[in-house]
Amino acid sequence: MDRGDILSGSAFTAVLRSAVVFLLVLVSVGWAALTYVETNLLTQYRADVKERWDILAADHEAEGPDHVVDTIRHVRTLHDSGARALAIFDGGGYLAGNIRTRPPGDGFQIGPLDHESAPPPGNAGEFVYYAGELGGRWLVVGQRLDMLHRTRAAFVQTLALTGFIVVLSMLSLGYFLSWQSLVRLREIEATLERASEGDVSARIPDTGGTTQIDRLAREMNRHLDRSSRLMTTTRNTAAAVAHDLKSPLGRAFLALGRAQDKLEAGADPRDALLDAESDLEQMRGIFATYLQLSRIEANTDSATFGAVGLGALVRDLAETCALVAEDAGQRLTAHLDDADDYEMRGDPQMLQQLVLNLVQNAINHGPQGNEICLELARRGPDIELVVADRGPGIPEEAREAVFQPFHRLDPSRTKPGTGLGLALVRAIVERHGGTIALHDHAPGLRVEIGFPAST
Ligand SMILES: Nc1ncnc2c1ncn2[C@@H]1O[C@H](COP(=O)(O)OP(=O)(O)OP(=O)(O)O)[C@@H](O)[C@H]1O
Ligand SMILES: [Mg+2]
């Protein structure tokens, strides 16, 4: 995979920006903290230096000027460590201590001293010192700023190391995430290419992830499902239409022939003409339903969508259909919460047609004494519509095929029907953003439909 593509990926560039912001914050916070620590250390050094100066001043007061010079000469530790500075001068110059030349200025000063020991390597040899007059002499007490320099160096090193490790980890993570997205994008690209070349089985592998790309991939797969089904349906439909129209067309042709014979024989041709008309009417019905199916699948009727109370719609239909079922020696009951409107967005006519098709199927394909049940319930954010019956049901292996236009289970075609009912039902469900599943009602068929409810 091209490294340039990974580095220009959105995950990597986002992490890169965050890394720059992190570095800026780290430098500002580090600088503020270092300034605070340095100021505190310096204050402490000053207090320490002044305290030592004051002790010698008190000694001078109590024991006299020569005693102070003596004391300075005999402080052994002064010469062991070069970190402390102490010296006394008079008008003629150096009297005692470890500083050879009197430094300029009085009071607190920061700067180099002419110290007898050289500073350790890497140390600038800077001191904080206090110089003041003591009975005509000049006393200087100082402290080398070792600790301050060590603290500063440790601080800078720690910050640099932290910055380096964090930024390196961030960039590695960004690179990995960018690489991961690029792999997914390449998969999507390859799948779409296969699909555009006519491969109806091409689908983007589902990793079960929840990233935006995963959700996009699932959405694309749904579109691919739909378009491959449309392609398969279109391929199969021409053959199915020809097959299913053959019988009524043949019968109409024969009836017209009979009518012609009757006319020639001077008999009344009306019976034969009525037969031909009914066959042609059946053909017209098939075309009308098929056209409606195509329109719904092509998504062209969205202007008719509005708020629909599914509760009222199902209650009304249940009343009418109960009578039809009764005529067929069957029983239809409805189960829904009367206090709930089951409001959703949709087309009331399409939804009516959906319920009618399912109930009609239950009645047509079910036996006498069949118990048909219409249910509406809320399932989380969805409204669930169930049509269940106690008829022969649909074997599991045929539950996908029955949704294909013109697909019927009864090979002898003894029952009336065109095989378009369930295709229309599924098209309507999908048009409303819902889902449909067929289950075994042991015995019978249970159709479960989920619609998104309006909030
Ligand atoms: N409730 C049911 N019980 C048993 N079989 C069913 C049921 N509903 C549908 N089927 C089977 O599924 C097939 C397809 O149903 P579909 O509604 O698409 O077509 P149809 O009922 O045959 O004709 P029509 O276009 O008039 O509805 C039916 O022919 C039938 O074999
Ligand atoms: Mg049907």
Image (spheres, rainbow, N blue to C red):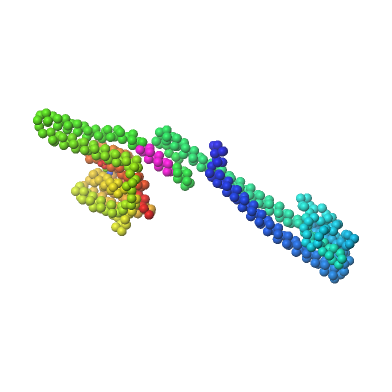
Residue extending furthest toward the right:
92
The residue that appears at 81% across and 62% down in the rendered structure is 106
Task: Specify whether residue 193 is painted magenta.
Answer: no
Q: Is residue 225 above or below residue 455?
A: above
Task: Specify whether residue 226 is painted magenta.
Answer: yes
In the picture, residue 295 is in which quadrant?
A: top left
The residue that appears at 75% across and 61% down in the rendered structure is 45
Ligand 2 quadrant assignment? top left
Q: Position of residue 225 (x, y in %)?
A: 39, 40
Q: Nearer the viewer, residue 364 or 159?
A: 159
Q: Is residue 70 above or below residue 379?
A: below
In the picture, residue 235 is in which quadrant?
A: top left
Q: Position of residue 337 (x, y in %)?
A: 30, 57
The residue that appears at 20% across and 36% down in the rendered structure is 279
Q: Which residues are magenta?
A: 218-230
Q: Main secondary structure of the magenta part?
A: helix
Q: Position of residue 13 (x, y in %)?
A: 56, 44
**Visible residue check, residue 76:** no
**Visible residue check, residue 140:** yes
Residue extending furthest toward the bottom:
62
Q: Quadrant of the C terminus?
A: bottom left
**Is 175 on the left-hand or right-hand side of 82?**
left
Q: Nearer the viewer, residue 288 or 240?
A: 288
Q: Quadrant of the N terminus?
A: top right
Residue extending furthest toward the left:
266
In the picture, residue 404 is in which quadrant?
A: top left
The residue that appears at 80% across and 65% down in the rendered structure is 53
